Each structure stands twice: as structure tokens, then as C-alpha cells.
Image (cartoon, coloured by chain):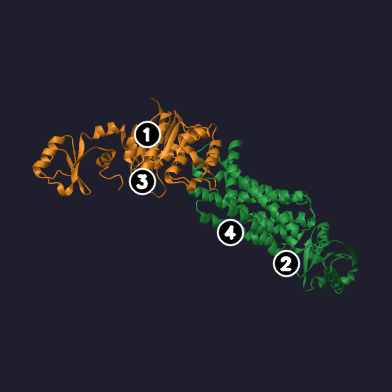
Chain colours: A orange, B green
Amino acid sequence: MSAVLEARGLFKRYPKAAANAVDGLSLSVREGSCFGLLGPNGAGKTTTVEMLEGILKPDAGEILYRGAPIGVTFRERTGIQFQDTALQDHLTVRELLNLFGALYPSRLPEVELSKLCDLGELLDRDPDKLSGGQRQRALLALALVNDPDIVFLDEPTTGLDPQARRNFWDLARQIKARGKTILLTTHYMEEAYALCDEVAIVDKGRIIAQGAPDTLLKKHFDGVVIELPKADYKAPVGGVPGQAIEHGEMMELMTGEVEAALEALKRGGSSLAHLRVRPRTLEDLFLALTGRELRE
Amino acid sequence: MMRRFWAVLIGRNKEFVRDRGALGWNLLFPFFVVFGMAFAFSDKAQDVFKVGVVGEISSLPSGFAATKHLKFVSFDDASSAQNKLRHHQLDMLVQAGAPLTYWVNEKSPKGYLVERIMLGTDAAKFSPERKAVEGKPIRYVDWLVSGLLSMNMMFSALFGVGYNLVRYRKNGVLKRLKATPLRAVEFLTAQVVSRLILIMAVFTVVYQGSDLFLHFQRLGSLFDLYLIFALGSACLVSLGLLVAARVTSEELAGGVLNMLSWPMMFLSGVWFSLEGAPKPLRLLAGAMPLTHLIDAARAVMAEGATLSQVSPHLYILGGMTALFLAVGAWTFRWD
């Protein structure tokens, strides 16, 4: 499939900053896919995505929408949900939808939008008086008001409770089912795994790994993680197959040979009562690639 | 283009009208000012005698010119000075020469006194020729009301647009709009027009409302007055826009707006006439849009001037508006 959005060699440095916020980043987003930019706070995700949105001008590099530099057509065909947006005061959700809708050459009918984002009785309320999840739904509706090709979602579920977060994921899946391209930034690896066809892990303004989540995990890891409390762990003579890492109160063994590892643990006298085996996650991948935790 | 403009305009108007506190304040404050001043200055404020001079003051007989407690104001044009005399804004008007010509208002007691005073000085030697005019006095409040309404307009224009734009920029409303096809000029025009509508609505309510109780003496046409106030507020709104074009801090914007509005409040002739003020002060006042607004409005209100008579002020206001708008739109930043 063709690239709907492409960035080549983006650089951005803020005045007085010691390092580039975005440092030679390139990416290509396929039409109809959900592309995730992942990384810790301060990795350069928001700077990158704001350049892709056309809000921020890169110091160097180019951004192409369907092969042409981004311009008016691009703004007409995109929808953006910023990480934190203030809206005009004293307007209801419905009035804001009408206001923003009028700014575009074509718009999605209110009924359809309301159904898609589950707005219902939210339409006549003041966005400032909505709960976190309701507000995100209203902002999503604003991002979709022009029936865009590409939807940018910048940290859409930060600060939401787990239930609201899952509801939001359902909405995102419905949008994707309508053939829209989604560009998502998040520092929740779980969210990226749940929604994205392709992820790019960003650290210090660069992409350090990119691909489909499962492919990425397979490429960098084989096997699983065996976790047990540090107090229960006794290092066996001759070691365990794989890699042992201390992680807070837990000991994590990353290994492809589960049986041999369990055998070695038993031999060494570790207690296996609280042992857990789990698959590798993007979180582990970030740790393995950078030596740092995502939420440091 | 028009659709986007309308959408933003309507949004902004709703936002304002629903902000009850701000709306109430915008309506009540000017009433307080006008009534407060009408009450405080129910007698004429200046108690010095004011004598108009057609031509240079130095041309007067020196003994008369040296009389204490007489304030001499020079006029190039006899007819506008006669108008002022007619409305008791001057107590007497003199033109040097032989014979020395002077005009007094038959209805003015102060005019009678100044006449007696003059005839007791060396002016009597120039075989003075008396000419009489008649007319009802213009109260200080009639004179003051144009200034007060203009001043209120200035605060509403500068802070209503300037401060609000900076707030929008700071909290990200502008950034959200930047991501849409909305163009800066559409957005800015909508802000200006929205504020103009508000200002003119407030003006109508306050002017007509105060008129019910204070019975202003308006000699010129109401339509002209409206036109002048509309142009003047467009100019002041554009100035607010210019200040807010790039600033991101509300404190800085507030500081700059105060720095602009306070000198205008005191030096553009809201409270007292600048006739006879030192030249540097008058030059400074001439650079202030509020001065031109007040001068034009006052001329229509208190002297019955027509638009063509105040056209220099209108050209200056129009030019300033165009300049402020152009530079404001050119330097405007969404973020």
C-alpha cells in the first residue's frame, strides 16, 4: 500500500536547548494503517507529531502528503486531537462542532459524528464540565468533523481511567474501520500494542526501532519472561540460560529455553511458588534497547 | 472565506454574550462613569474666564493681554470660535486691530463680566466694536460625554481584543485553530468585527440611556456621531490586535495595554480641552487615536460640525486603522 504521509530527515531544536528535540527522523505511514509513535515523555514525540501536523516548522527535512509538500489540502484532509487543548469558552459541544465544521469545505453530519463518538447528551454540554473520558470523546469528534483521511491522536488516553481508556480504544478501532489512517503517540506500550499496525519507538529525537509490534518483539526477543520475587531467587551455580535482570522487587529472566531455565532455578534452590511467566512486551523492548525504563 | 469568517464571528459573539459577568460589566461601567461625572461636574468645571483670540495672542493690546485670571486661546478661524462662544465654551472672542472687534454672548453672565473687564483696560483705546451672538450654554457634561464614551470604548477595544487574543494563544485555542484551514486574516477580521458590534451596542445603550436622564445637547447629526465612533473603535480595536499579534504572556500584554491606555486617558482631551496646552503636549496628543476620536465626536456633538469639517481626524483614524491592521495581521502568530 502507498504512503499517505512521509517524513524525511526531520530536525528540530528549540531555542536554548542543548540537544535537538528531533534529530534526523524519517518515517512513512501507510494509507489506512494505525501508526504509533512510542517513547517516554520528552522523547520528541509531540515535537515530531506537531511537525507532521504542520503546526510546527521543522528546522530541516520535508514532510509529504500523498507525495506533495503539506499545505492547504493537507489541513483540509486531516483531523487533530491535541494532547491538551483549550476550547473557546461558553460554547457547547454542538456549537463547537458547528464552528469547526464550518472551517472545512466538507463535514461529517452531526448525527453520524455523534453516533461515531458516542456523544449523545454530551452535545449540549459545556466541554469544560465533562469528565476526562467524555472530554476526549468530544475532542475526537472535533478532530473528525471534516471527515479527514488522517487523524492525529496525541496521547489521547493520558490521565483516563482503565475503563475509559478501553472505551477510547474501541472508538479508535471504529475510526480505523472506516478506512482512516491514524497517527497515534503514546507512552502506553499496551495502547500501542492494542491499536497499532506499525510502531516506531522514539528516544532522544530518533527512531530506535520500527515495525509491526509482533514482528518487532520477535526480531529482538525470543521466548518469554519468567518473573519471581527477588527474595525467592537464588542464583544457581552455572547460571540460568538467558538474561537475568533486577526490576524493582522482582527478578526477570528473559529466556527462550523455558524448561531449562526452570530446571536451573529449581536446582539452585529458588522458590517457585510466586513465579509468573509472561510474554515479552514493547515495554521490555524499550528497556532492552535503551537500558532505561519508559516511565522513568 | 465568508463562511469561515461567519463561523468564527458567531462563535466569538456567543462566547461574549454568555459571559454574563463581562457583559454586565461592559454595560454598567460606562453608565457609572457618565452619571458619576454628570453629578460631580453639575456646575461648570472651569471658573477662569476664557477669551478667544482670532489670530495671534501677541496682537492684543498688552494691558488687556496681561489681565490676571483671563485665559487667552488663539483661533485661526473666526467662525469656529464664534460657535464656541455661542455655546458658552468661550466667554468672549476678540480680534485685534483698529477698531478692535469683539463678540460676546448675550446669554452669558461671564461674557458680561469679561466685557466689563476688557473695557477697563488699554483695549478701550482701540475703539472696540461690539458684536453680539446668542446661544444656549453647553454644559460641561455635554462636552464631557464624548470623551467619556470614547475612553470607555478605548478600554473595551484594547483589552477586549488584545488580552483575549493573548489568552487564546496561551491556552492553545489558537493552536487548535491553526490546524484547520482557517486563515489568519479571517480569524482576525472576525475578532475585530465581533468587538465592534459589542462596542457599538454598548455605545447605543449607554448613550441613549444616559440621554433619557441627562438630556445631552447634541448639535450635529446622530448618524455622523455613530460613524465617528465606529471608525474610532475600529482604530482602537486594531491597535489592540497589533499589541497582541505575537505576545504570549498575559502580564506583558496587560503592561503594554496599560502603557498605551493611561497616557491616552489623560492626554487626549477626555477631561479638559487641549486648546492652549503646550505645543509638545499637543503634538503627543496628535499621535494618539483617542485624541482624534474625541475631537471629531466633540465637534459634532458640541459644535454641530459636519463630517467634512472633521475629515482630517477621520483620515488620520482611517490611516491608523489600516496601518495597525496590516502590521498586526502580518506579524500575527498562532502560537
Label 1–label 4 contact, CB within 8 A: no
How far apart in space, not on screen, are marks 1 and 3 (Cα)? 19 Å
- Whether marks 3 and 2 lie on the same chain: no
Name which of mark 1 and mark 3 comes first in the sequence: 1
Q: Residue at x 41, y 32 (%)?
A: A174
- Whether marks 4 and 2 lie on the same chain: yes
Instruction: Judge from the rendering whether residue B256 lies leftward or rightward of residue A179; answer left or right.
Output: right
**Picture quadrant of residue B209:** bottom right
**Label at residue A42:** 3
**Picture quadrant of residue B278:** bottom right
Residue A260 % position (x, y): 12, 36
Mark 1 or mark 3, which is nearer to you?
1
- Whether marks 1 and 4 lie on the same chain: no
Label 3–label 2 contact, CB within 8 A: no
Give the SS element for disc 3. Answer: loop
Q: Which chain carries label 4?
A: B
- Whether marks 4 and 3 lie on the same chain: no
Label 1–label 3 contact, CB within 8 A: no
Q: Residue at x 28, y 38 (%)?
A: A282
Question: According to the image, label 4 marks what residue?
Answer: B259
Amino acid type for the residue under numbered disc 1:
Phe
Amino acid type for the residue under numbered disc 2:
Phe
Residue B18 % position (x, y): 58, 49
Q: Which chain carries label 3?
A: A
Mark 4 or mark 2, which is nearer to you?
2
How far apart in space, not on screen, are marks 3 and 2 (Cα)? 63 Å
Question: According to the image, label 2 marks what residue?
Answer: B41
Amino acid type for the residue under numbered disc 3:
Gly
**Picture quadrant of residue A281:** top left
